[in-house]
Image (tube, rainbow, N blue to C red):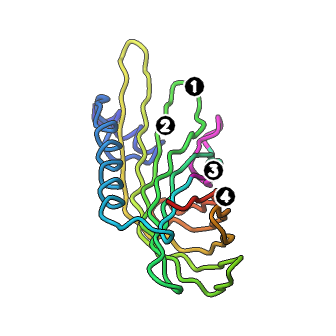
């Protein structure tokens, strides 16, 4: 078993392989509950927005030759404008990574960002992004008669980037940020609605 753990750890970079459990589902439910509690505690007004996005992340998939590749995902993003200069932007992204046959990957990121607006026009805001992220990956490998083994890894990192959004009741946005946890770049485009 130690040799198998070493091999799987070397190939996939995941530190602790063990038989597959349902812990990932519990973590996702916990993260959703935390996000709901955060939004429930904020006063709803025109300053609060909620929306969705499509995300492209580098280094999140594995090609058949073992090299890193791009993964696509979907996300939910909130925005609470503290004042004209600063906004809080929590978000959750679930990725759909590709992987070789026999390997299943699950990846998601929970973000807590702050936007610092340096262009503050009514029709356009351009902002610097800084924040924390919790990044999670689960790898599951099927060895046929020997069983299925899985392992997971999670890291806390920083988000650093730049973004822009339009004005109005329906706002389109684009974010470009670097995630230090898994050293990858994420490009997101989406829409926000006043709530």
Q: Percent position (x, y) of residue 39? A: 36, 60
Name the residue beneath numbered marker 3.
54
Q: Earlier in the sequence, mark 3 or mark 2?
A: 3
Label 1: few (<14), some (14–19) or many (≥20) C-alpha neighbours in 10 Å = few
Name the residue beneath numbered marker 1.
101
Query: Tag 2's secondary structure?
Result: strand
**How far is the residue under mark 4 from the one under mark 2?**
23 Å
Name the residue beneath numbered marker 2.
105
Residue at 53% in and 74% down: 160
Label 2: few (<14), some (14–19) or many (≥20) C-alpha neighbours in 10 Å = many
Q: Nearer the viewer, mark 1 or mark 3?
A: 3
**How far is the residue under mark 1 from the one under mark 3?**
25 Å
Q: Nearer the viewer, mark 4 or mark 1?
A: 4
Name the residue beneath numbered marker 4.
189
**How far is the residue under mark 4 from the one under mark 3?**
6 Å
Badges 1 and 3: C-beta atoms under 8 Å apart?
no
Q: Earlier in the sequence, mark 4 or mark 2?
A: 2
Badges 4 and 3: C-beta atoms under 8 Å apart?
yes
Q: Which residues are magenta?
A: 52-66
Label 3: few (<14), some (14–19) or many (≥20) C-alpha neighbours in 10 Å = some
Label 4: few (<14), some (14–19) or many (≥20) C-alpha neighbours in 10 Å = some
């Amino acid at each position: 078993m130690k040799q198998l753990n070493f091999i799987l750890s070397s190939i996939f970079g995941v530190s602790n392989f063990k038989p597959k459990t349902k812990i990932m589902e519990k973590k996702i439910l916990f993260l959703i509950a935390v996000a709901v509690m955060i939004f429930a505690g904020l006063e709803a007004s025109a300053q609060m927005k909620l929306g969705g996005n499509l995300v492209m992340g580098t280094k999140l998939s594995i090609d058949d030759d073992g090299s890193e590749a791009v993964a696509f995902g979907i996300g939910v993003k909130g925005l609470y404008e503290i004042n004209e200069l600063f906004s809080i932007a929590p978000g959750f992204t679930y990725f759909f990574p590709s992987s070789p046959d026999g390997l299943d990957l699950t990846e998601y990121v929970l973000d807590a960002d702050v936007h610092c607006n340096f262009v503050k026009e009514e029709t356009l805001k351009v902002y610097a992004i800084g924040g924390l992220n919790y990044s999670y990956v689960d790898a599951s490998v099927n060895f046929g008669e020997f069983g299925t083994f899985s392992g997971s890894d999670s890291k806390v990192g920083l988000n650093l980037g730049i973004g822009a959004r339009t004005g109005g009741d329906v706002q389109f946005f684009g974010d470009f940020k670097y995630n230090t946890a898994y050293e990858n770049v994420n490009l997101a485009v989406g829409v926000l609605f006043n709530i």
